[in-house]
Amino acid sequence: MSFKITTWNINSVRLRIDLVAKFLKSVRPDVLCLQETKCPDDAFPLKRFHRLGYEHVALNGQKGYHGVAIVSRAPFESFKFDNFCGKTDCRHMSVVLGERAGLKDPLTLHNFYVPAGGDEPDPTINPKFEHKLSFLDEMQAHMGLRPADKERAILVGDLNVAPLEHDVWSHKQMLKVVSHTPIECEKLAAAQKAGNWVDTMRVHTPEPEKLYTWWSYRAMENWRVSDRGRRLDHIWASDAIAGEVSKIKIFKDYRGAEKPSDHVPVTATIEV
């Protein structure tokens, strides 16, 4: 049985609910993980998701900023969220899917929205960048993000770091730009290594092929021609399930939709 998980920084779920509906009708993932929902839980468009067949929803949202959500066609066994850096800014949520989702073995799914970090890559003068580095450090140290040997786990989300040379349009020009600075790349790699996570997107599309999931709003008219993208969205898998990820698809055309997010959906197909 194939099981599809999609991650998407939607940049306001209420503003782009029609675009989300179009995607769900077309692709029909089993689970959709959203970031930057910018929506308090009591204002989340639950009825629209229910009509689309996604009746099971886990929310960690706030008004105007941040926020993550996981919507599913099958029920969760449990869900929770963790706070990082002593803040309650709604950047993480995890669920466990099991027999009721048609899975023979439990699957833990983490959904993250890592802080963007502002514009200046200096933590001594930019508190947003300092927050981002601290967040990545806490991800590395978090014992809940270290799957046991046989634990089936997936970590997805907007991690706001393009870690590899070919995850950005120009490695040399981006080295001093937040999202691709050496310190960010090192800290994300350390978090990945601590949990022994497999970068499934790069398993299916190895370097040196370019791989992007985000294109700036500053290039609205010619974003496709200039193609100055970054891979900020990620799908990691624990060793126990990485070999079952059969396909990764980046839906680049959604960047060209009317009133798009600057991120596009990314879907992993898992043979369970």
Image (cartoon, rainbow, N blue to C red):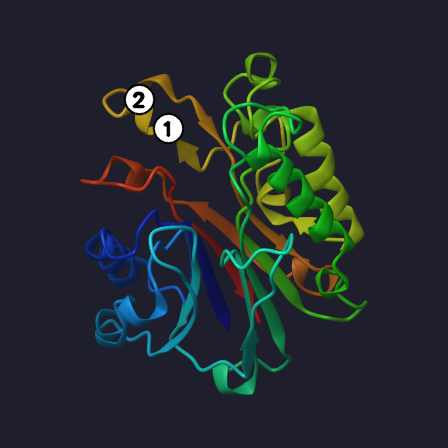
- Residue 209 seen by the camera: no
Q: State the residue position of label 1.
A: 216
Residue 104 percent across, percent down from the top left: 61, 82
Q: How many labels does the image show?
A: 2
**Helix, strand or loop at disc 1?**
loop
User: What amino acid does circle 1 point to?
Assistant: Ser
Query: In the figure, residue 241 lies in which quadrant?
Result: bottom right
Residue 20 percent across, percent down from the top left: 27, 56
Foreground pick, 245 / 44: 44
Q: State the residue position of label 2.
A: 219
Foreground pick, 45 / 250: 45
Left or right for 194, reference 123: right
**Helix, strand or loop at disc 2?**
helix
- Residue 112 seen by the camera: yes
Q: Residue furthest bottom?
A: 100
User: What amino acid does circle 2 point to?
Assistant: Ala
What's the residue at 37%, 44% (across, down)?
251
Residue 140 percent across, percent down from the top left: 75, 50
Foreground pick, 245 / 87: 87
Task: Tell me if residue 21 comes above or below residue 119 in the rendering.
Answer: below
Residue density around tag 1, few if under 14, some if 14–19, many if 20 or more, within 10 Å:
some
